[in-house]
Amino acid sequence: MKAKIHVTLKQGILDPQGKAIEHALGSLGFKNAGNVRVGKYMEVEVNETDKAKADAAVKAMCEKLLANTIVEEFTYELQ
Amino acid sequence: MKIGVVVFPGSNCDHDCQHIFKDVLGQSVEMIWHKETSLAGLDAIVLPGGFSYGDYLRTGAIAKFSPVMGLVKEFAKGGGMVLGICNGFQILLEAGMLPGAMLRNKSLHFICKDLSVKVENAATSFTSACQPGQVLKIPIAHADGNYYTDPVTLAAMQANAQIVLRYCTPESKVTPAANPNGSLDNIAGIINAAGNVLGMMPHPERCAETVLGNDDGKLIFLSMLESLKQGKKPLQMASA
């Protein structure tokens, strides 16, 4: 199965890159753009056919390595 | 004394640390490759600055799983002194040996310059050669030094004098303007509750001999050696 994983800074933690991009969008005239958050997107092939097992494995990967849960949060989908 | 300097792929301040301990301070130094499986005979360990594993994923995120890090954790658990400088500090955070995490500098810039740093706690094994409140001029060189922790942990560290170094003005005022990277509470260096693991973003090894025009950083290393010489256990802090 393939896991598609997003890691972003937690809401409430300043994201300087997001802020810089937000300002750039504003100066380009996109006045409707706000609260830009920059994150990472990762794909992982998980060698499991059982969705529950794959889900547990991906969650553990995120918690142990892919995200630093002190400052980041993660979401993923399995296909 | 025998000092171990850990070398990760991408470490680049390892030889500076070796030079200071060996050539400037006359100690024995062992370079510890990250795949090392024994730390026998070492009195203290330094995790040097650099870009371990290319800073891939996050600074220190992959280095924390290096085989040697299990040994470093054991060494610290037994009361051994561990100093993490810059990337070494980031690795200590990722490994959970110190609380908190590093965020990208608020300005997004890589900042490399001399800064003033105030010794907030001169009673640790890493700062005992400094005067309380002394201002040290030490360079920083990093893009991810914006320290963050949750408010509860911060309050506990403040109450416990674990915030050892803070960015300040040359006149020792800790102000927002003296904060180079957005670091919480102007934090430049913290120590664990047991008092034997210190992480700091400034690079004392880059200013530890007079020929470089500044030897303020030497005080950190002299403090370590003095503590080791006295054979005293790391100063026990009040429990967090």
Image (cartoon, coloured by chain):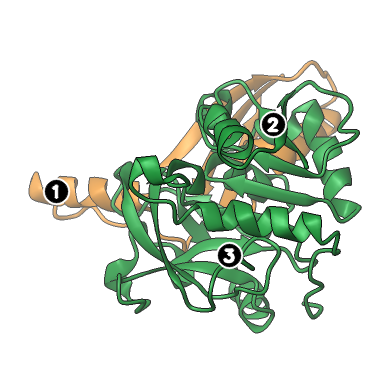
Q: Amino acid at mark 1?
A: Phe
What's the colour of chain A in the image? orange
Question: In whole angstroms, how far apart are the C-alphas of marks 3 and 1?
Answer: 34 Å
Q: Amino acid at mark 2?
A: Val
- Residue B57 seen anywhere in this rendered image of the structure: no
Q: Amino acid at mark 3?
A: Thr
Q: Nearer the viewer, mark 3 or mark 1?
A: 3
Q: Is residue A17 left or right of residue B66?
A: left
Q: Is residue B159 left or right of residue B174?
A: right
The disc, 2 or 3, on the residue closer to the chain's N-terminal end is 2
- Residue B181 seen anywhere in this rendered image of the structure: yes
Q: Which residue is mark 1?
A: A30
Which chain does tag 3 point to?
A: B
Which chain does tag 2 point to?
A: B
**Secondary element at image label 2:** strand
Q: Which residue is mark 3?
A: B149
Q: Residue at x 49, y 51 (%)?
A: B201
**Secondary element at image label 1:** loop
Residue B158 locus on image (x, y percent): 61, 79
Q: Residue at x 32, y 73 (%)?
A: B176
**In the rendered structure, are the residues bearing label 2 and label 1 in contact, judged by CB atoms less than 8 Å apart?**
no
Q: Which mark is residue B6?
A: 2
**In the rendered structure, are the residues bearing label 2 and label 3 in contact, judged by CB atoms less than 8 Å apart?**
no
Q: Residue at x 55, y 61 (%)?
A: B189
Packing grade of label 1 (10 A; few <14, some 14-19, many >=20) is few
What's the colour of chain B in the image? green
